[in-house]
Image: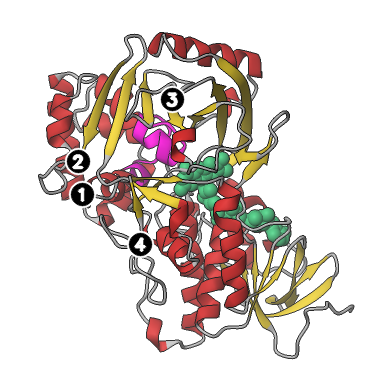
Amino acid sequence: MSGDSSVTDEPRVVVVGGGIAGCACALALAGRGESVTLIEENEGLGGRYTSVKLAGISRQIDNTPEMIFRSDERFLQLLATCEAREVIKLQKQTILSFIETESGRISTIQSGTLPPPNHLAKSILNANFLGLGDKIAMQKVVKAIRAMDEQYRRSLDEQIFLEWLQENGQTERAISRFWNPLVRTALNIDSSEASAAAATFLLKRGLFDKADAFDLGAFTTDLTEALAPNLRRTLATAGVDVQLNKQVTGLFREDTKVTGVSTQSGFIPAAKVILCTPISATARLLTGAGASVASHEVADRLAALQTTALLGIHAFHEGPVLPEGTNIVTCVDEPLIQTLIDRSTQLDDGKRAGLPGHWICARVANADPYLEWDDELIRTEYERVIASAFPTAPKLTDFHVVRIPRASTELRPGTQRLRPDPLDAGEGVILGGDWIDIDWPSTLEGASRAGLTAASALLEQNANKDLAGWNHEHPWPDWPEAPRRGAEGWREW
Ligand SMILES: Cc1cc2nc3c(=O)[nH]c(=O)nc-3n(C[C@H](O)[C@H](O)[C@H](O)COP(=O)(O)OP(=O)(O)OC[C@H]3O[C@@H](n4cnc5c(N)ncnc54)[C@H](O)[C@@H]3O)c2cc1C
């Protein structure tokens, strides 16, 4: 068997996949003294968290802007440990804006002084886009979620969230204008298809648990630039052997136990292999020659998990479109133009060079039905909404659509039992992608928690006593804490 240049006498832990999960995992392990090799098939780190180059634009731009929240605590810890706090600014106060596109009327919901889960109640009462009956009904959801324990919440995984909302007395308008946009944006699936367990988890953790949980974070620079160099530097400092442009083509097994990986350039022995790869790549690796029954079973479960698409509609205008003070707005009752983000305003001064105008991004979640739409049709729809909501908007000068077919895991009813635990795939291999069963959806936070969960599973096997009992609900003890409001060193807006 041909040797790889990285082969050393002592097999290292091999982490496959240099997305957020793989990087978090590799860094956490290296921080605990493990010798780690991280293998990534692309030329850069970051995985799905990435930017694209579009025809006619001299620089790269986000595929779609990634939205994070203060509740994304492990991801924020990852940023901090990479000394990359400055790439994000977090709201000082939760602010959610909704626009009725026919009239252009904007309602803003913001956190007030009442303790959670009632911190948004006062401004919801004043919001114009909902009626009094809708608002009274919404309190029932707040109460139901507050009363829900974890065992009961997880038991809702066979139910559709829309049904759960209806059972809990929600009006059609409260569903279509409030609950559905929130769930669709965060889970990338509509309430009519989403698992009630996944959606209530999101509302509990993201909206109602802590008063600051839903403070939005915006990246202040291009996505790839924001993180990849910082990850690279931190991994190098931690002693992780990062191998880019290298695809793992198979897992090497001795009596079904995984003892290494194959790449185009040879075999790499491994003390343990941690798979932080996307669902389809993982399923392929788990079914190679000699794979155990457990490995095949996990692959079957992963094959049953589906993904959903996102669209990034990137429009460039001669000047700002959204009114001053409004940075992100949800367009109520708009199926395609769901959310408008003033990306130019989010970027730092000096980070707007090369953009062909003032950048507005319409982020389209659950976008599979729109993948076939051509750019002209999407542009017509975008221009209709802008003309109606903002009749004096500056002229559109450039327009692009980015289609991302397999953006995130689809959390339909029944998916909870398909998501595996880290050790489910048999000896020698640990699972750590954003699809493992950690309740969090397929997000930057889900990926960070998954990578750390995989790392802790390995450390536990290696009898690392300090981490006994750690689970992803706890901060990663070796990294700086996630910021609460006003935390020193973090930017707010
Ligand atoms: C367009 C878009 C918008 C999003 N918006 C948001 C958002 O607003 N907020 C949010 O929190 N999340 C968002 N997400 C989700 C979030 O980006 C992902 O959940 C997260 O980045 C997944 O990280 P991961 O490390 O688990 O997987 P990935 O990022 O998919 O990383 C897996 C890595 O494995 C590598 N790989 C695959 N096969 C092999 C192999 N055989 N050998 C070596 N390497 C391999 C891949 O190249 C990739 O780099 C968005 C995702 C997309 C696509």
Distance of label 3 from label 4 (alpha carbons): 33 Å
Q: Nearest the camera: 53 or 427? A: 53
Of the two numbered discs 3 and 4 in the rendering, the one whose residue sits closer to the viewer: 4
Residue range highlighted in magenta: 181-199
Location of residue 354 in the rendering, given as x and y in whole percent from the top left corner: 63, 35
Say what amino acid the circle numbered 1 marks.
Ala
Which of the two discs, 3 and 2, sits closer to the camera? 2
Q: Does the residue labelled 3 lie within 8 Å of ligand 1?
A: no
Residue 135 magenta-highlighted: no
Q: Where is residue 85 drawn, in percent x and y?
A: 43, 59
Q: Distance between the residues labelled 1 and 3?
A: 25 Å
Mark closest to the chain's N terminus, 1 or 3:
1
Q: Position of residue 201 (x, y in %)?
A: 32, 48
Which residue appears farthest toward the right when viewing the image?
2
Residue 296 figure quarter? bottom right
Residue holding disc 2: 111
- SS for callout 3: loop
Closer to the camera in the image, 109 or 457: 109
According to the picture, the residue beneath numbered tag 4 turns out to be: 489
Q: How crowded is mark 1: few (under 14 residues within 10 Å), some or many (20 or more)?
A: many
Q: Residue type at mark 2?
A: Ser
Q: Do the residues labelled 3 and 2 touch (CB within 8 Å)?
A: no
Q: Which mark is residue 211?
A: 1
Q: Pointer 3: what residue?
A: 338
- Mark 4 residue crowding within 10 angstroms, few (<14) / some (14–19) / many (20+): few
Whether residue 276 is visible here, answered yes or no, is no
The mark that comes first in sequence, 4 or 2, is 2
